[in-house]
Image (spheres, rainbow, N blue to C red):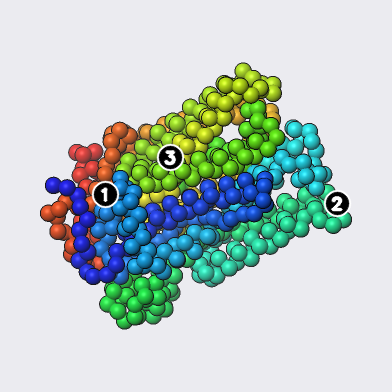
Amino acid sequence: MGLVPTPAASSGPLRPAKPRRELLALGIFGTHWVHIKTGVHLDFSRTSVLSPHPSSFSSFSLPARAPGFTPHSYSLALGIMVWNPLAQTLVVYRDIKANPRYYWMAASACWGGMLFGWDSGLIGGILDRPAFKHAFGLSDNPKAYADIKGWIASVLHAGCFFGAMSAAFISERFGRKGALMIAAFWFHLGSLLQTTSASGSQSSSSALTQLYIGRAIGGYGVGMVSVVVPTESPRWLGEKGRWEDAKAVIARLARKPIDDPDVVNEADDIKADLEKNVKLSFSEQFRQATSSGRMFYRCSIPAIMMFWQQWTGVNSMNYYSPTIFGELGMKGSKPGLLGTGIYGIVKIVMTLLVLSLGMEQYGRKALLVWGGVGQSLPMFYIAGYRHIRQDSPKVDGASYVAILMIYLYVTFYSFGWSVAPWPAMSESVPNQLRALTMAIGLMSNWLFNFTITKLTPILLSKIRWGTYLLFACTTMSAVLWAVFFFPETGGYAIEDIHQLWSGNILKQSMNDNKYLFQSYNNRAQGAVNTNDTEHQARPNMHEKTDRDSTSKSSDDRIEKVHA
Protein backbone atom coordinates (compact mmCIF):
# COMPACT_ATOMS: atom_id res chain seq x y z
CA MET A 1 0.00 0.00 0.00
CA GLY A 2 1.99 2.98 -1.22
CA LEU A 3 1.63 6.71 -1.16
CA VAL A 4 0.72 8.01 -4.59
CA PRO A 5 -0.60 11.30 -6.02
CA THR A 6 -4.36 11.26 -6.42
CA PRO A 7 -6.20 13.27 -9.10
CA ALA A 8 -7.93 16.40 -7.90
CA ALA A 9 -11.63 16.14 -7.34
CA SER A 10 -12.30 19.25 -9.37
CA SER A 11 -10.93 20.14 -12.73
CA GLY A 12 -8.23 22.71 -13.17
CA PRO A 13 -4.49 23.09 -12.89
CA LEU A 14 -2.48 21.93 -9.94
CA ARG A 15 -1.07 24.58 -7.63
CA PRO A 16 1.14 24.25 -4.54
CA ALA A 17 -0.66 23.61 -1.27
CA LYS A 18 2.16 25.17 0.70
CA PRO A 19 3.34 28.19 -1.32
CA ARG A 20 5.27 29.41 1.71
CA ARG A 21 7.71 26.52 1.23
CA GLU A 22 8.36 27.41 -2.42
CA LEU A 23 8.75 31.09 -1.54
CA LEU A 24 11.09 30.26 1.30
CA ALA A 25 13.28 28.23 -1.03
CA LEU A 26 13.31 31.02 -3.61
CA GLY A 27 14.01 33.66 -0.99
CA ILE A 28 16.91 31.97 0.77
CA PHE A 29 18.44 30.99 -2.57
CA GLY A 30 18.24 34.59 -3.74
CA THR A 31 19.81 36.00 -0.60
CA HIS A 32 22.86 33.77 -0.95
CA TRP A 33 23.11 34.54 -4.68
CA VAL A 34 23.23 38.25 -3.99
CA HIS A 35 25.96 37.69 -1.39
CA ILE A 36 28.06 36.10 -4.14
CA LYS A 37 27.30 38.67 -6.82
CA THR A 38 27.86 41.75 -4.67
CA GLY A 39 31.01 40.32 -3.12
CA VAL A 40 32.74 38.82 -6.13
CA HIS A 41 31.63 41.42 -8.64
CA LEU A 42 32.58 44.15 -6.23
CA ASP A 43 36.10 42.77 -6.46
CA PHE A 44 36.14 42.47 -10.23
CA SER A 45 33.38 43.97 -12.34
CA ARG A 46 31.44 46.07 -9.82
CA THR A 47 28.04 44.87 -10.95
CA SER A 48 25.30 43.52 -8.73
CA VAL A 49 22.11 41.54 -8.55
CA LEU A 50 19.15 42.07 -6.25
CA SER A 51 17.69 39.29 -4.12
CA PRO A 52 15.37 38.36 -1.26
CA HIS A 53 15.88 37.63 2.38
CA PRO A 54 14.12 34.80 4.19
CA SER A 55 12.62 37.06 6.81
CA SER A 56 10.38 38.39 4.07
CA PHE A 57 8.33 35.21 4.18
CA SER A 58 7.45 35.14 7.85
CA SER A 59 3.91 36.39 7.40
CA PHE A 60 3.27 35.27 3.85
CA SER A 61 -0.09 33.75 3.08
CA LEU A 62 -1.73 32.77 -0.18
CA PRO A 63 -5.16 31.13 -0.41
CA ALA A 64 -5.00 27.61 1.00
CA ARG A 65 -6.82 26.25 -2.03
CA ALA A 66 -6.43 28.08 -5.31
CA PRO A 67 -9.18 27.73 -7.90
CA GLY A 68 -9.35 24.21 -9.24
CA PHE A 69 -6.90 22.83 -6.70
CA THR A 70 -6.96 19.96 -4.21
CA PRO A 71 -4.29 20.48 -1.53
CA HIS A 72 -3.44 16.84 -0.90
CA SER A 73 -2.39 16.12 -4.46
CA TYR A 74 0.46 18.60 -4.71
CA SER A 75 1.83 18.13 -1.21
CA LEU A 76 1.76 14.38 -1.76
CA ALA A 77 3.42 14.70 -5.15
CA LEU A 78 6.06 16.97 -3.66
CA GLY A 79 6.69 14.56 -0.81
CA ILE A 80 7.16 11.66 -3.21
CA MET A 81 9.21 13.54 -5.76
CA VAL A 82 11.81 15.13 -3.53
CA TRP A 83 13.71 11.92 -4.18
CA ASN A 84 13.20 12.24 -7.95
CA PRO A 85 14.52 15.64 -9.05
CA LEU A 86 13.65 15.16 -12.72
CA ALA A 87 10.03 14.28 -11.98
CA GLN A 88 9.76 17.16 -9.54
CA THR A 89 11.19 19.58 -12.10
CA LEU A 90 8.62 18.46 -14.69
CA VAL A 91 5.73 18.92 -12.26
CA VAL A 92 6.92 22.39 -11.26
CA TYR A 93 7.41 23.35 -14.92
CA ARG A 94 3.88 22.26 -15.81
CA ASP A 95 2.49 24.06 -12.80
CA ILE A 96 4.29 27.28 -13.69
CA LYS A 97 2.97 27.00 -17.22
CA ALA A 98 -0.58 26.46 -15.95
CA ASN A 99 -0.45 29.14 -13.21
CA PRO A 100 2.12 31.74 -14.30
CA ARG A 101 0.58 34.64 -12.45
CA TYR A 102 0.82 32.96 -9.06
CA TYR A 103 4.52 32.40 -9.64
CA TRP A 104 5.09 35.90 -10.98
CA MET A 105 3.43 37.25 -7.85
CA ALA A 106 5.61 35.03 -5.68
CA ALA A 107 8.75 36.05 -7.55
CA SER A 108 7.92 39.76 -7.40
CA ALA A 109 7.24 39.48 -3.68
CA CYS A 110 10.63 37.88 -3.18
CA TRP A 111 12.34 40.90 -4.70
CA GLY A 112 11.24 42.96 -1.76
CA GLY A 113 13.64 41.04 0.47
CA MET A 114 16.68 41.65 -1.71
CA LEU A 115 17.71 44.60 0.40
CA PHE A 116 19.41 42.68 3.20
CA GLY A 117 21.28 40.34 0.87
CA TRP A 118 22.49 43.32 -1.11
CA ASP A 119 23.82 45.07 1.98
CA SER A 120 25.58 42.08 3.55
CA GLY A 121 27.37 41.28 0.30
CA LEU A 122 28.26 44.90 -0.44
CA ILE A 123 29.44 46.33 2.86
CA GLY A 124 31.30 43.18 3.88
CA GLY A 125 33.40 43.41 0.75
CA ILE A 126 34.48 47.05 1.07
CA LEU A 127 35.12 47.61 4.79
CA ASP A 128 38.76 46.52 4.63
CA ARG A 129 39.60 48.21 1.34
CA PRO A 130 42.29 50.93 1.52
CA ALA A 131 40.29 53.15 -0.84
CA PHE A 132 37.28 53.03 1.49
CA LYS A 133 39.38 53.90 4.54
CA HIS A 134 41.05 56.76 2.67
CA ALA A 135 37.74 58.22 1.43
CA PHE A 136 36.38 58.49 4.98
CA GLY A 137 39.68 59.31 6.70
CA LEU A 138 39.63 56.15 8.80
CA SER A 139 42.49 54.96 10.94
CA ASP A 140 44.70 52.04 9.96
CA ASN A 141 45.05 51.10 13.64
CA PRO A 142 43.30 47.69 13.86
CA LYS A 143 41.75 48.23 17.30
CA ALA A 144 40.54 51.75 16.54
CA TYR A 145 39.11 50.70 13.19
CA ALA A 146 37.36 47.65 14.69
CA ASP A 147 34.93 49.89 16.59
CA ILE A 148 34.23 52.10 13.57
CA LYS A 149 33.80 49.09 11.30
CA GLY A 150 31.27 47.62 13.71
CA TRP A 151 29.23 50.81 13.69
CA ILE A 152 29.28 51.13 9.90
CA ALA A 153 27.99 47.58 9.43
CA SER A 154 25.52 47.49 12.33
CA VAL A 155 23.83 50.88 12.16
CA LEU A 156 21.69 49.54 9.31
CA HIS A 157 20.31 46.88 11.66
CA ALA A 158 19.36 49.52 14.20
CA GLY A 159 17.21 51.09 11.50
CA CYS A 160 15.85 47.65 10.62
CA PHE A 161 14.69 47.15 14.21
CA PHE A 162 12.58 50.31 14.20
CA GLY A 163 11.33 49.64 10.68
CA ALA A 164 10.07 46.21 11.75
CA MET A 165 8.50 47.77 14.85
CA SER A 166 6.47 50.29 12.86
CA ALA A 167 5.57 48.08 9.90
CA ALA A 168 2.40 46.57 11.38
CA PHE A 169 0.86 49.97 12.15
CA ILE A 170 1.78 51.44 8.77
CA SER A 171 0.51 48.45 6.79
CA GLU A 172 -2.74 48.45 8.76
CA ARG A 173 -3.23 52.17 8.10
CA PHE A 174 -2.16 52.35 4.44
CA GLY A 175 -2.35 48.73 3.29
CA ARG A 176 0.59 46.56 2.36
CA LYS A 177 1.04 48.17 -1.03
CA GLY A 178 1.16 51.61 0.56
CA ALA A 179 3.57 50.35 3.21
CA LEU A 180 5.85 48.96 0.51
CA MET A 181 5.89 52.30 -1.25
CA ILE A 182 6.79 54.05 2.02
CA ALA A 183 9.54 51.50 2.72
CA ALA A 184 10.91 51.94 -0.81
CA PHE A 185 11.06 55.72 -0.28
CA TRP A 186 13.13 55.36 2.89
CA PHE A 187 15.44 52.79 1.33
CA HIS A 188 16.07 54.98 -1.72
CA LEU A 189 16.69 58.01 0.46
CA GLY A 190 19.16 56.04 2.56
CA SER A 191 20.87 54.71 -0.56
CA LEU A 192 21.18 58.23 -1.97
CA LEU A 193 22.78 59.51 1.23
CA GLN A 194 25.27 56.63 1.28
CA THR A 195 26.14 57.03 -2.40
CA THR A 196 26.81 60.76 -2.16
CA SER A 197 28.86 60.60 1.04
CA ALA A 198 32.59 61.37 0.75
CA SER A 199 31.99 63.33 -2.46
CA GLY A 200 33.25 66.73 -3.50
CA SER A 201 34.88 68.87 -0.81
CA GLN A 202 33.03 67.18 2.06
CA SER A 203 35.17 66.61 5.14
CA SER A 204 35.88 63.03 6.19
CA SER A 205 34.03 63.40 9.52
CA SER A 206 30.97 64.87 7.77
CA ALA A 207 31.09 62.09 5.17
CA LEU A 208 31.21 59.41 7.86
CA THR A 209 28.25 60.98 9.67
CA GLN A 210 26.28 61.05 6.42
CA LEU A 211 27.16 57.40 5.83
CA TYR A 212 25.84 56.47 9.28
CA ILE A 213 22.60 58.41 8.74
CA GLY A 214 22.10 56.95 5.28
CA ARG A 215 22.56 53.40 6.51
CA ALA A 216 20.16 53.93 9.42
CA ILE A 217 17.48 55.41 7.13
CA GLY A 218 17.97 52.66 4.56
CA GLY A 219 17.77 50.10 7.34
CA TYR A 220 14.40 51.49 8.38
CA GLY A 221 13.10 50.62 4.92
CA VAL A 222 14.70 47.16 5.04
CA GLY A 223 13.12 46.38 8.40
CA MET A 224 9.69 47.52 7.25
CA VAL A 225 9.90 45.41 4.10
CA SER A 226 10.96 42.34 6.11
CA VAL A 227 7.59 42.41 7.88
CA VAL A 228 5.32 43.70 5.11
CA VAL A 229 6.48 41.73 2.06
CA PRO A 230 4.63 40.28 0.27
CA THR A 231 1.27 41.97 -0.12
CA GLU A 232 -1.76 39.81 0.89
CA SER A 233 -4.18 41.66 -1.37
CA PRO A 234 -7.37 39.51 -1.38
CA ARG A 235 -7.35 38.98 2.38
CA TRP A 236 -6.57 42.61 3.17
CA LEU A 237 -9.29 43.78 0.79
CA GLY A 238 -11.69 41.37 2.45
CA GLU A 239 -10.80 42.72 5.90
CA LYS A 240 -11.76 46.17 4.61
CA GLY A 241 -15.07 44.86 3.24
CA ARG A 242 -14.00 45.28 -0.40
CA TRP A 243 -15.10 41.83 -1.55
CA GLU A 244 -15.63 42.72 -5.21
CA ASP A 245 -12.06 44.01 -5.38
CA ALA A 246 -10.86 40.85 -3.64
CA LYS A 247 -12.65 38.70 -6.23
CA ALA A 248 -11.10 40.76 -9.01
CA VAL A 249 -7.59 40.05 -7.64
CA ILE A 250 -8.29 36.32 -7.35
CA ALA A 251 -9.76 36.22 -10.86
CA ARG A 252 -6.77 38.06 -12.29
CA LEU A 253 -4.33 35.63 -10.67
CA ALA A 254 -6.30 32.59 -11.81
CA ARG A 255 -6.97 34.05 -15.28
CA LYS A 256 -10.68 33.35 -14.88
CA PRO A 257 -13.85 35.50 -14.97
CA ILE A 258 -14.82 37.17 -11.72
CA ASP A 259 -18.05 35.15 -11.55
CA ASP A 260 -16.31 31.81 -12.12
CA PRO A 261 -17.33 29.29 -9.41
CA ASP A 262 -13.72 28.70 -8.42
CA VAL A 263 -13.17 32.42 -7.88
CA VAL A 264 -16.39 32.77 -5.90
CA ASN A 265 -15.55 29.72 -3.77
CA GLU A 266 -12.08 31.05 -3.02
CA ALA A 267 -13.51 34.40 -1.93
CA ASP A 268 -16.07 32.57 0.21
CA ASP A 269 -13.29 30.55 1.86
CA ILE A 270 -11.40 33.72 2.73
CA LYS A 271 -14.58 35.31 4.07
CA ALA A 272 -15.38 32.25 6.19
CA ASP A 273 -11.86 32.22 7.59
CA LEU A 274 -12.04 35.92 8.48
CA GLU A 275 -15.40 35.41 10.18
CA LYS A 276 -14.06 32.44 12.14
CA ASN A 277 -10.87 34.20 13.21
CA VAL A 278 -11.86 37.60 14.51
CA LYS A 279 -9.06 40.08 13.96
CA LEU A 280 -7.57 41.20 17.25
CA SER A 281 -5.89 44.47 18.08
CA PHE A 282 -2.27 44.34 19.19
CA SER A 283 -3.30 44.99 22.79
CA GLU A 284 -5.78 42.09 22.64
CA GLN A 285 -3.15 39.88 21.04
CA PHE A 286 -0.71 40.80 23.80
CA ARG A 287 -3.27 39.92 26.50
CA GLN A 288 -3.88 36.52 24.94
CA ALA A 289 -0.17 35.89 24.42
CA THR A 290 0.49 36.49 28.12
CA SER A 291 -2.64 34.74 29.40
CA SER A 292 -0.63 31.80 30.75
CA GLY A 293 2.96 30.68 31.08
CA ARG A 294 2.50 27.99 28.44
CA MET A 295 0.94 30.44 25.95
CA PHE A 296 3.66 33.01 26.66
CA TYR A 297 6.37 30.46 25.92
CA ARG A 298 4.63 29.34 22.74
CA CYS A 299 4.32 32.94 21.54
CA SER A 300 7.98 33.56 22.43
CA ILE A 301 9.21 30.86 20.03
CA PRO A 302 9.78 33.30 17.11
CA ALA A 303 11.88 35.63 19.28
CA ILE A 304 13.81 32.71 20.80
CA MET A 305 14.46 31.22 17.36
CA MET A 306 15.83 34.49 16.02
CA PHE A 307 17.96 34.98 19.13
CA TRP A 308 19.64 31.60 18.69
CA GLN A 309 19.96 31.98 14.93
CA GLN A 310 21.93 35.21 15.29
CA TRP A 311 24.08 33.88 18.15
CA THR A 312 25.34 31.05 15.97
CA GLY A 313 27.48 33.87 14.60
CA VAL A 314 26.40 33.56 10.99
CA ASN A 315 26.28 37.28 10.31
CA SER A 316 29.81 37.58 11.63
CA MET A 317 30.74 35.37 8.72
CA ASN A 318 28.48 37.18 6.28
CA TYR A 319 29.91 40.61 7.04
CA TYR A 320 33.46 39.87 8.10
CA SER A 321 34.37 36.68 6.23
CA PRO A 322 37.12 38.46 4.24
CA THR A 323 38.67 39.60 7.54
CA ILE A 324 38.34 36.10 9.00
CA PHE A 325 39.97 34.47 5.98
CA GLY A 326 42.77 37.02 6.28
CA GLU A 327 43.29 35.92 9.88
CA LEU A 328 43.72 32.37 8.64
CA GLY A 329 46.71 33.35 6.50
CA MET A 330 45.14 34.36 3.18
CA LYS A 331 46.69 37.44 1.56
CA GLY A 332 45.89 39.85 -1.27
CA SER A 333 42.59 39.33 -3.08
CA LYS A 334 42.14 35.76 -1.81
CA PRO A 335 40.21 36.68 1.38
CA GLY A 336 37.58 38.53 -0.66
CA LEU A 337 37.24 35.70 -3.16
CA LEU A 338 37.09 32.97 -0.53
CA GLY A 339 34.92 35.01 1.85
CA THR A 340 32.28 36.25 -0.57
CA GLY A 341 32.46 34.15 -3.73
CA ILE A 342 33.12 30.54 -2.77
CA TYR A 343 31.51 31.05 0.64
CA GLY A 344 28.28 32.19 -1.03
CA ILE A 345 28.32 29.36 -3.56
CA VAL A 346 28.55 26.84 -0.74
CA LYS A 347 25.54 28.46 0.93
CA ILE A 348 23.49 28.29 -2.25
CA VAL A 349 24.23 24.65 -3.01
CA MET A 350 23.68 23.44 0.55
CA THR A 351 20.49 25.44 0.97
CA LEU A 352 19.02 24.00 -2.21
CA LEU A 353 19.86 20.49 -1.04
CA VAL A 354 18.21 20.83 2.35
CA LEU A 355 15.10 22.53 0.97
CA SER A 356 14.77 19.76 -1.61
CA LEU A 357 15.67 16.75 0.50
CA GLY A 358 15.48 17.52 4.19
CA MET A 359 12.95 20.16 5.26
CA GLU A 360 9.81 18.09 4.83
CA GLN A 361 11.38 14.66 5.28
CA TYR A 362 13.25 15.08 8.55
CA GLY A 363 11.49 18.05 10.04
CA ARG A 364 12.59 21.17 11.87
CA LYS A 365 13.98 19.67 15.06
CA ALA A 366 16.47 17.35 13.38
CA LEU A 367 17.75 20.16 11.17
CA LEU A 368 18.17 22.50 14.14
CA VAL A 369 19.97 19.91 16.26
CA TRP A 370 22.27 18.32 13.69
CA GLY A 371 22.82 21.59 11.87
CA GLY A 372 23.80 23.25 15.16
CA VAL A 373 26.18 20.43 16.13
CA GLY A 374 27.77 20.63 12.69
CA GLN A 375 28.17 24.41 13.06
CA SER A 376 29.75 24.33 16.49
CA LEU A 377 32.45 21.72 15.80
CA PRO A 378 34.22 23.80 13.08
CA MET A 379 34.14 26.80 15.41
CA PHE A 380 35.83 24.76 18.15
CA TYR A 381 38.56 23.78 15.69
CA ILE A 382 39.14 27.35 14.49
CA ALA A 383 39.23 28.57 18.10
CA GLY A 384 41.93 26.01 18.90
CA TYR A 385 43.85 26.83 15.73
CA ARG A 386 43.84 30.58 16.44
CA HIS A 387 44.77 29.97 20.09
CA ILE A 388 47.85 27.99 19.06
CA ARG A 389 48.78 30.45 16.32
CA GLN A 390 48.00 33.83 17.81
CA ASP A 391 50.53 35.64 15.64
CA SER A 392 50.16 35.93 11.87
CA PRO A 393 49.54 32.32 10.83
CA LYS A 394 51.47 30.77 8.00
CA VAL A 395 49.70 29.03 5.15
CA ASP A 396 50.12 25.30 5.63
CA GLY A 397 48.03 22.18 6.06
CA ALA A 398 46.53 23.30 9.38
CA SER A 399 45.45 26.66 7.94
CA TYR A 400 43.83 24.98 4.95
CA VAL A 401 41.92 22.75 7.36
CA ALA A 402 40.77 25.89 9.19
CA ILE A 403 39.54 27.33 5.89
CA LEU A 404 37.72 24.07 5.22
CA MET A 405 36.11 24.44 8.66
CA ILE A 406 34.61 27.78 7.59
CA TYR A 407 32.94 26.06 4.66
CA LEU A 408 31.75 23.20 6.87
CA TYR A 409 30.33 25.79 9.24
CA VAL A 410 28.25 27.45 6.54
CA THR A 411 27.28 24.05 5.12
CA PHE A 412 25.72 22.98 8.41
CA TYR A 413 24.20 26.44 8.91
CA SER A 414 22.48 26.02 5.55
CA PHE A 415 21.21 22.62 6.70
CA GLY A 416 19.90 23.89 10.02
CA TRP A 417 19.57 27.35 11.46
CA SER A 418 19.37 29.01 8.05
CA VAL A 419 16.12 27.41 6.89
CA ALA A 420 14.44 25.57 9.77
CA PRO A 421 13.56 28.53 12.04
CA TRP A 422 11.33 30.27 9.52
CA PRO A 423 8.67 27.57 9.11
CA ALA A 424 9.08 26.46 12.73
CA MET A 425 8.37 29.88 14.20
CA SER A 426 5.40 30.39 11.91
CA GLU A 427 3.96 26.96 12.76
CA SER A 428 4.40 27.38 16.51
CA VAL A 429 2.20 30.38 17.19
CA PRO A 430 -1.62 30.63 17.16
CA ASN A 431 -3.08 32.04 13.95
CA GLN A 432 -4.86 34.91 15.67
CA LEU A 433 -1.63 36.02 17.38
CA ARG A 434 0.67 35.66 14.39
CA ALA A 435 0.83 39.37 13.54
CA LEU A 436 2.17 40.24 16.99
CA THR A 437 4.45 37.25 17.51
CA MET A 438 6.04 37.35 14.07
CA ALA A 439 6.64 41.09 14.36
CA ILE A 440 8.37 40.51 17.71
CA GLY A 441 10.33 37.64 16.16
CA LEU A 442 11.62 39.85 13.36
CA MET A 443 12.43 42.63 15.81
CA SER A 444 14.47 40.05 17.74
CA ASN A 445 16.20 39.11 14.49
CA TRP A 446 17.24 42.70 13.78
CA LEU A 447 18.15 43.48 17.40
CA PHE A 448 20.59 40.59 17.73
CA ASN A 449 21.73 41.03 14.14
CA PHE A 450 22.78 44.53 15.21
CA THR A 451 24.41 43.21 18.38
CA ILE A 452 26.48 40.54 16.64
CA THR A 453 27.48 42.76 13.74
CA LYS A 454 28.61 45.52 16.10
CA LEU A 455 30.52 43.27 18.50
CA THR A 456 32.29 40.93 16.07
CA PRO A 457 35.14 43.22 14.88
CA ILE A 458 35.78 44.27 18.48
CA LEU A 459 35.83 40.65 19.64
CA LEU A 460 38.16 39.66 16.78
CA SER A 461 40.49 42.48 17.80
CA LYS A 462 40.46 41.89 21.57
CA ILE A 463 39.80 38.23 22.34
CA ARG A 464 40.61 36.88 18.86
CA TRP A 465 40.35 33.09 19.16
CA GLY A 466 37.81 33.50 21.94
CA THR A 467 35.35 34.88 19.36
CA TYR A 468 35.10 31.48 17.68
CA LEU A 469 34.87 29.72 21.05
CA LEU A 470 32.01 32.03 22.03
CA PHE A 471 30.00 31.21 18.91
CA ALA A 472 30.74 27.50 19.28
CA CYS A 473 29.35 27.54 22.83
CA THR A 474 26.27 29.63 22.02
CA THR A 475 25.48 27.33 19.08
CA MET A 476 25.69 24.29 21.35
CA SER A 477 23.35 26.07 23.77
CA ALA A 478 20.90 26.50 20.89
CA VAL A 479 21.17 22.77 20.20
CA LEU A 480 20.37 21.93 23.83
CA TRP A 481 17.35 24.23 23.72
CA ALA A 482 16.09 22.49 20.58
CA VAL A 483 16.58 19.06 22.19
CA PHE A 484 14.84 19.77 25.50
CA PHE A 485 12.40 22.64 24.90
CA PHE A 486 11.26 22.54 21.28
CA PRO A 487 8.80 19.89 20.06
CA GLU A 488 8.70 18.94 16.38
CA THR A 489 6.22 21.28 14.64
CA GLY A 490 6.55 19.86 11.13
CA GLY A 491 4.05 17.37 9.77
CA TYR A 492 1.03 18.77 11.62
CA ALA A 493 -2.05 20.24 10.04
CA ILE A 494 -2.18 23.88 11.07
CA GLU A 495 -5.56 23.28 12.73
CA ASP A 496 -4.05 20.61 14.99
CA ILE A 497 -0.87 22.36 16.05
CA HIS A 498 -2.39 23.80 19.24
CA GLN A 499 -2.61 20.28 20.70
CA LEU A 500 1.17 20.04 20.54
CA TRP A 501 1.49 22.73 23.22
CA SER A 502 -1.37 21.67 25.48
CA GLY A 503 0.60 19.12 27.52
CA ASN A 504 4.03 18.88 29.08
CA ILE A 505 6.33 20.68 26.62
CA LEU A 506 9.50 19.11 28.01
CA LYS A 507 8.00 15.62 27.73
CA GLN A 508 6.73 16.31 24.22
CA SER A 509 10.13 17.66 23.18
CA MET A 510 11.93 14.63 24.55
CA ASN A 511 9.47 12.30 22.84
CA ASP A 512 10.01 14.08 19.53
CA ASN A 513 13.76 13.49 19.76
CA LYS A 514 13.06 10.20 18.02
CA TYR A 515 12.71 12.26 14.86
CA LEU A 516 16.39 13.12 15.15
CA PHE A 517 17.06 9.64 13.81
CA GLN A 518 14.06 8.97 11.58
CA SER A 519 11.81 10.85 9.19
CA TYR A 520 8.14 11.44 9.85
CA ASN A 521 7.55 11.42 6.06
CA ASN A 522 5.37 14.53 6.13
CA ARG A 523 2.24 12.39 6.55
CA ALA A 524 0.19 15.05 8.27
CA GLN A 525 0.65 17.59 5.48
CA GLY A 526 -1.36 15.77 2.87
CA ALA A 527 0.04 12.31 2.10
CA VAL A 528 -2.71 9.75 1.72
CA ASN A 529 -2.93 6.01 1.18
CA THR A 530 -4.12 4.67 -2.14
CA ASN A 531 -7.44 3.55 -0.64
CA ASP A 532 -8.07 6.75 1.27
CA THR A 533 -10.69 8.82 -0.54
CA GLU A 534 -11.40 11.20 2.32
CA HIS A 535 -9.27 13.89 0.73
CA GLN A 536 -11.35 13.96 -2.44
CA ALA A 537 -14.28 15.70 -0.82
CA ARG A 538 -14.15 19.46 -0.57
CA PRO A 539 -14.54 20.41 3.11
CA ASN A 540 -17.37 22.69 4.13
CA MET A 541 -15.55 25.77 5.32
CA HIS A 542 -18.70 27.18 6.91
CA GLU A 543 -19.27 24.18 9.15
CA LYS A 544 -18.59 25.04 12.79
CA THR A 545 -15.98 22.56 13.94
CA ASP A 546 -12.92 22.73 16.16
CA ARG A 547 -10.64 22.13 13.20
CA ASP A 548 -10.78 21.87 9.43
CA SER A 549 -8.25 19.06 9.05
CA THR A 550 -9.09 15.40 8.71
CA SER A 551 -5.46 14.32 9.15
CA LYS A 552 -5.00 11.52 11.68
CA SER A 553 -1.23 11.64 11.90
CA SER A 554 -1.21 14.74 14.10
CA ASP A 555 -3.55 13.15 16.64
CA ASP A 556 -1.59 9.92 16.72
CA ARG A 557 1.71 11.68 17.37
CA ILE A 558 0.29 13.81 20.19
CA GLU A 559 -1.78 11.10 21.86
CA LYS A 560 1.29 8.94 22.36
CA VAL A 561 2.72 11.65 24.58
CA HIS A 562 -0.41 12.42 26.54
CA ALA A 563 -1.31 8.77 27.06
477 sits to left or right of 469? left
Q: Secondary structure at mark 2?
A: loop
Can residue 290 be seen in the rendering of this structure?
no
Say which of marks 2 and 3 sits in front: 3
Marks 2 and 3, how far apart in space?
46 Å
Q: Which amino acid type is marked by label 3?
A: Phe
Give the residue at x 53% y 64%: 169
Does 237 appear above or below 315? below
Q: Is residue 182 visible?
A: yes
Front in this rendered view, residue 191 or 442: 191
Residue on which disc 2 sits: 203
Front residue of this view, candidates 539 and 48: 48
Seen from the viewer's position, the closer of residues 30 and 236 is 30
Count of marks, rendered view: 3
**Residue on which the image places disc 1:** 80
Q: Quadrant of residue 321?
A: top right
Q: Using residue 88 as the reference point, say whether residue 174 is left or right of it.
A: right
Circle 1 SS class: helix
Q: CA distance from mark 1 to mark 3?
A: 20 Å
Residue 288: x %, y % from top left: 40, 54
Residue at horizontal 52 percent and vertical 55 percent from the top: 52
Q: First in sequence: mark 1 or mark 3?
A: 1
The percent coordinates of residue 530 (x first, y second) are 15, 53
Within 10 Å of the Cα at label 3, are there few (<14), some (14-19), or many (20+) other Cα atoms?
A: many
**Disc 1 crowd, CA 10 A, few/some/many (<14, 14-19, 20+):** some
Q: At 34% across and 49% down in the image, what residue appears?
A: 85
Q: Mark 3 highlights which residue? A: 415
Amino acid type at circle 1 is Ile
Q: Secondary structure at mark 3?
A: helix
**Label 2 is placed on what type of residue?**
Ser
